[in-house]
Amino acid sequence: MMKERRPYPALLWLTGREAAVIGGGPVALHRIEGLLDAGVKVRIIAPDAIEEIVNLVVEGRVKWHKEPFASSMLRGASIVICATDDPDVNRRAAWAAKSMGALVNMAAPPLELSDFTVPASVRRGDLLFSVSTGGACPELSRRLRGELESLSDIYAPWLEKLVPIREEIKDRLESSEERRAFWREALSEEAMALVREGKLEEAEAKVRNAVDRSRAQS
């Protein structure tokens, strides 16, 4: 009996890697935009493409193989996105990509050939929220994404305030256990409650007090 597939959650740094996107429609565009945002070099494989994709080609942001799919077009790609409306083309592209060692995302059927899914996500600067149902109910993922939008507006500014404090603590406290103990105290429920209320200055003051206490103990 085959074991049920379960995804491994991960964030990938793909700057400078190459990806091939098979298809030139709205779904392909969505994947392309995410790849470009991650610094990936994108090539599109499709006889035709919607205007938004053509504009990206004209701007020099992506390359375009303006012809039907052929497996030779995948050489050098670390990631392959299959997003055509033809399941046979998607299937051929997926198996060709797998044979070359590339990771495959099926943005269109047959979805079971995917090596990974693209979760619904919200990004605000360095803060990234993502949620996935493993393909069981994408509509729920999209609904939860809407709820995460409001959380990102709260926590993204808070993260900006914490970054310089983290650097200071890294220099002051030598062991990882000391740093974990500091953050358990600094990010207390009281401080986080202030963040949720939008009182970032008061919350920062509490974290700064914890910094002062760590300075006195060092």
Image (cartoon, helix red, strand yellow):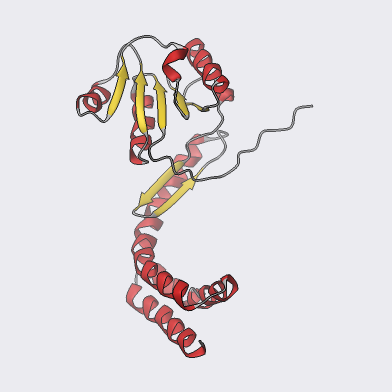
x and y percentages locating residue 156 in the rendered image: 36, 60
User: Taking 8 as reference, is 154 above or below it?
Assistant: below
Q: Quadrant of the N terminus?
A: top right
- Which residue is found at the position 34% from the left and 72% from the top? 200
Q: Residue furthest bottom?
A: 216
Q: Nearer the viewer, residue 19 or 24?
A: 19
Question: Above or below — where is 201 with respect to 38?
Answer: below
Q: Is residue 137 left or right of residue 27?
A: right
Residue 85 is at least partly visible in this image = no
Q: Position of residue 36 (x, y in %)?
A: 33, 36
**Place of residue 72 in the rendered image (x, y in percent of width and height, measured from the top left):** 45, 14
Q: Where does residue 47 sit, x and y in percent of width and height? A: 33, 11
Q: Along the line of sight, which residue is nearer the eye, 52 or 20?
A: 20
Left or right: residue 195 compared with residue 115: left
Count the marks. Answer: 0
Give the quarter of the image for residue 58.
top left
Please state if 188 lies on the left or on the right of 2 as rendered. left
Residue at the image point whose x is 46% and y is 78% from the top: 172
Compare residues 98 and 153 and report the one nearer the observer: 98
- The part of the image, by quadrant, that contains residue 59 is top left
Image quadrant of residue 198? bottom left
**Residue at image coords 42%, 11%:** 69
User: Residue 171: in sight, yes or no?
Assistant: yes
Q: What residue is at 57 percent from the left and 20 percent from the top?
A: 99
